[in-house]
Amino acid sequence: MSQGRSTDRAWDALEARILQCRRCPRLVAWREEVARVKRRAYREQTYWGRPVPGFGDRRARVLVVGLAPGAHGANRTGRMFTGDSSGDFLYRALYEAGFANQPEARHRNDGLTLQDMYITAVCRCVPPKNRPTAEEIRNCLPFLVEEMRLLKPYLRVIVALGRIAFEGVLRVYRDHLGHDVPRLHFAHGAVYPLGEGWPVLVASYHPSRQNTQTGRLTREMFADIWTQVRRLLEAGET
């Protein structure tokens, strides 16, 4: 069996484990309740209502890590950052930066593809009020660990969307991958090289409605993040 086929099988097996996960009773109950009750605008749709796997290029040099599926976004559509305002903000920026083939993400079969990028999250199930507990994060983090291991031969840049994602990535390195990363401060636009042979970590505010509608995160600020990512990739090619 070729190495490529073996790696693809590992990705498929990981996705199967994510889809079957029922480890956190509170999150299982909430994701299924949201899928059953629905939002009025989507009452004719069948909600996903399950854990949401990562999405994108399995040989990506850029990994984007968010918090968790949105209640009526990814928990409805089954794809990360798809079907809500956060996804609208994110994918337009990725399209303009050349990482996505289209600026919109509506549903799993809308033709969206990512180039050189994989998108995932710290938690795979929607948490009540978007606030997972520390235990729920610990339960879900092994999935991120495995994704980062599979991407390791290619990975050059990690973009953490929000403080929880930022801390989750650092925890993976310290507690699971044996890399002694120093204490780092989360700040929008901060860039942290993690050492020789390791990716560069870029911090960004999360494109949540709370941030984008208040002006805490503008389109210009977000575009600057992806410009910086492109520069880091180009620098790594020289």
Image: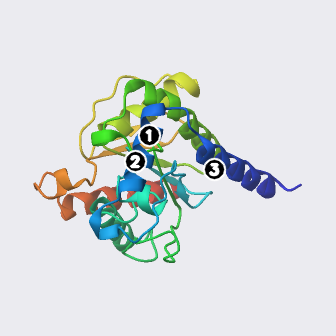
Find numbered disc 1 in the image and state the secondary structure of the residue it sits on: helix
Sequence-wise, the earlier of marks 1 and 3 is 3
Find numbered disc 2 in the image and state the secondary structure of the residue it sits on: helix
Q: The N terminus lies in which quarter of the figure?
A: bottom right
Is residue 62 or residue 168 the one in the foreground? 168
> How crowded is the residue under tag 2: few (<14 C-alpha within 10 Å), some, or many (20+)?
few
- In terms of image quadrants, where is residue 104? bottom left
Q: Residue at x 53, y 35 (%)?
A: 196
Which three-letter amino acid code belongs to the residue tagged 2?
Glu
Coloring basis for residues? rainbow
> How crowded is the residue under tag 3: few (<14 C-alpha within 10 Å), some, or many (20+)?
some
The answer to whether residue 65 is visible is no
Residue beneath label 3, please?
15
Query: Are the residues tagged 3 and 2 within 8 Å (C-beta)?
Result: no
Which three-letter amino acid code belongs to the residue tagged 3?
Glu
Q: Is residue 199 above or below residue 211?
A: above
Find numbered disc 3 in the image and state the secondary structure of the residue it sits on: helix
The answer to whether residue 49 is visible is yes
Instruction: Name the spot of residue 179 as percent of width and height, x first.
Output: 54, 25
Residue beneath label 1, please?
29
Marks 1/3: CA distance? 21 Å
State left or right for residue 191 relative to residue 123.
left
Is residue 120 or residue 137 the one in the foreground? 137
Is residue 195 or residue 223 the one in the foreground? 223
Instruction: Name the spot of residue 102 as percent of width and height, x first.
Output: 42, 77
Q: Residue at x 57, y 33 (%)?
A: 142
- In terms of image quadrants, where is residue 146? top right
> How crowded is the residue under tag 1: few (<14 C-alpha within 10 Å), some, or many (20+)?
some
Which three-letter amino acid code belongs to the residue tagged 1?
Ala
Sequence-wise, the earlier of marks 3 and 2 is 3
Residue beneath label 2, please?
33
Query: Are the residues tagged 2 and 1 within 8 Å (C-beta)?
Result: yes
